Amino acid sequence: MTADPILDPLNAAQRAAVTAPLAPALVLAGAGSGKTRVLTHRIAWLIGTHQVSPQSILAVTFTNKAAGEMRTRVERLLGIAPGVLWIGTFHGIAHRLLRRHWREAGLIESFQIIDAEDQQRLIKKLLKAEQLDETRWVPREIQWFINTNKDAGHRPQGLKSGNDPTRAQMIRLYGLYEAACARSGVVDFAELLLRSFELWRDQPAVLQHYRQRFRHVLVDEFQDTNSIQYAWLKLLVGSQSCPFVVGDDDQSVYGWRGARVENLQQFGRDFPAAQLFRLEQNYRSTGAILAAANGLIANNAGRLGKTLWTSGAQGEPIRLYAAFNERDEAEFVCQRIREHVTRGGVHRDIAVLYRSNAQSRVFEEIFLATRVPYRVYGGLRFFERAEIKDALAYLRLLVNRSDDASFERVVNLPTRGIGAKSLETVRAAARVTGSSLWEATQACLGEALGARASTAMRGFLELIERLTAEIHGLDLHEQVDRMLAATGLIEFHQRDKAERGEARAENLEELVSAARGFGAERSDTDLPPLEAFLAHVTLESGDGQADAWEDSVQMMTLHTAKGLEFPIVFLCGMEDGLFPHQRSIGTLEGLEEERRLCYVGMTRAMRQLYLTYAEQRRLHGIDNFSQPSRFIKETPEELIEEIRPRIQVSRPVAAGRFAEDGGVHGAVSYRRTGYPGRSSHAEPAAPGMRLGARVRHGKFGEGVILNLEGSGPQARVQVNFERQGTKWLVMQYANLEPL
DNA sequence: ATGATGATATTTTTT
DNA sequence: ATATCATCAT
């Protein structure tokens, strides 16, 4: 017996999965059960032990990060770079296919990828051109309509309006949008997937080639696949390949953007011979944390069934803290973090997780004030910044003249005297001839356009032409640099003496650095460097911040936290209406997805888990009273230790509702400095006006109090009337009668 | 062409 | 409270 680096580190269940016969396999892998490990070891096993050619393996993930991680780990296991191994995201692989087969896919060779923001701009343009009212036809909704249909595999021709004029219009807009994309030679994210699906569906020769090549298809986070992704996989796999899919129905939290957990069950039906493996031993969390998560998720119906266990210690109880308000909540978390650090802990061990991004603000304020280093994940990434996208638009135009969106974006940036009127002329001309804005402009020079506008436009066209010639053959970063100089973009921002101008100029410099750093990682396609770079930045705009590896508290939404782990986790804002979110509370599916999200959050914690909520929270500028999240009640009580602050002098006596249990569990006492806003908590708005109380109004009838704000006669209450709906009323005038 | 003004909405996010 | 966005005025 010799040491086997591929199989030795695995437990029995993992090993069974990794060494599954070369046939379809489904692995249900609970949180922290070694999912990635099984995937990577399976690949290594196929190549290393089973002599499978790396060429015949395709591994698909959802994020670039996961793909990168998988590649690194496989390489480390095998001790070599398995060269032609295809590991990538669904979108990345689809892109690769479309680049290779652009002709068969009906694209132009230099097609460009647009992100969600570009997509929305395009839709807005369309609405304007169609003279449709944006309040009636909300761009976001149209975008959603288009994307969900693409995700479901539907083209506008295949959609039925069913006598619904609104729907008919949506379908028409979808069609117009498609035409606009085709004219511009751009492809959105959903299109990458749909288009490559159609490529295989409609080009048997192409499909045949890939079917023969990829005998082993591995899929990560299978519960997150949407319809088109699954259809794409099924097409590829056919009847001969061995799909090896790994997923966890309890961690399906992207239903709202088209992910279909049902694909897990569907897989079993589509591949009846598939072997099922369960990974239930958790290596991440303490017994208490797992028990809490298990107890919570047991409230969901229709699970595939899976219970995490650990051979490790029970660990500390789950800590629950009821804060007065969001400030208090943040102060509590901050206090605990400082204690952790005082005892020799590091900041990066800690994650503050919340349901929505807006919640990060208060934490940031407190952390800033107390000099706790932190990092917020999410928000605008580098390549999504406006100034970067401006620069990219120039680059795209250099590559593809018919990219109308990019044309419009930069034609007058920096301002060169091309106003709305000239642009409208050009747009109209383009519409008539069905040509690109670029071509239309050429046709309009000196004709439809006045002398002045013509000069300006000619200047722009010549700039682009000149630049194209000038940068030909240069190094990528030189190309970017020349573009920035020639277009005057950098200068434009430098002239803005405000701080943001400076920052933007710096970001543009950074773009040059990014271009310089690019290249090594480019092995995929034989695309020219600039084209490859453009595809890279839209497709892998991700994690430009990963370099900031300081010791800091990690702050992110629960969604972002999926797949990560931290020794100490604070799950904040555990209030009904916030988490579960108000908009998900209405439906069972919505609520269950929120519950899974909570499950994901809990299982991020390795050693300590804190749940916190605020009894009063200021949201959108108004104070809301809220109930603790139902997820707290669904967590087995015996696992929870409630932390209540010991009463301090600054504590108002009137806060009687805390008096009885104040300090009972308070192992630690917190100095609560007084801050404004608490008084309203102590004094009810008026007698009988409590949250949830029934009231009668002279005109509106009976209703239930949803919210209270302020105190005394100026106080306002939000009442949900049985017949009139929800209204805000001022106590002074409302004349509400308690029931 | 630029900035002030007012209206509006405000889960979650990768690619 | 606040951020974004369209419209309007300068």
Image (cartoon, coloured by chain):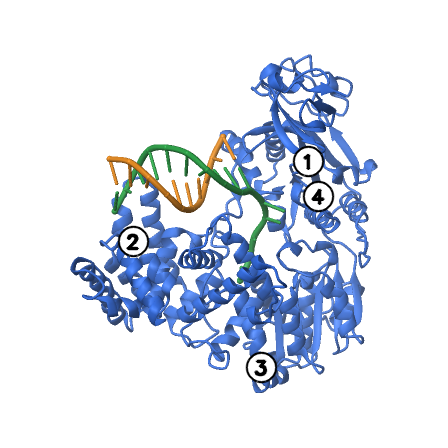
Chain colours: A blue, B green, C orange
Residue bearing mark 2: A420
In depth, the one of A83 and A8 nearer the eye is A83
Cα–Cα span, label 3 and label 4: 42 Å
Q: Are marks 1 and 4 on the same chain?
A: yes
As measured in the structure, the alpha-carbon distance from the residue carrying label 4 to the one carrying label 2 is 45 Å
Q: Amino acid at mark 1?
A: Glu
Residue at image location 35% in from the left, 42% down from the top: A500
Q: Amino acid at mark 4?
A: Ile
The mark that comes first in sequence, 3 or 4, is 3
The percent coordinates of residue A13 (x first, y second) are 79, 64
Is there a contact, CB below 8 Å, between mark 3 and mark 2? no
Label 2's element?
A: helix
Rounded to the nearest angstrom, the CA distance separating label 3 from label 2 is 43 Å
Chain letter for mark 1: A
Give above or below for A305 relative to A110. Answer: above
Q: Whole-Å distance between the Cαs marked 1 and 4?
A: 12 Å
The answer as to whether the residues below labels 2 and 1 share one chain is yes
Q: Residues within 10 Å of mark 2 (few under 14, many from 20)?
A: few
* Chain label for disc 4: A
Q: Amino acid at mark 2?
A: Ala
Badge number at residue A585: 4
Number of marks in picture: 4
Which residue is under mark 1? A575
Left or right for A26, reference A424: right
Q: SS for tag 1? A: loop
Q: Chain of mark 3?
A: A
Q: Which of disc 4 and disc 1 is earlier in sequence? A: 1
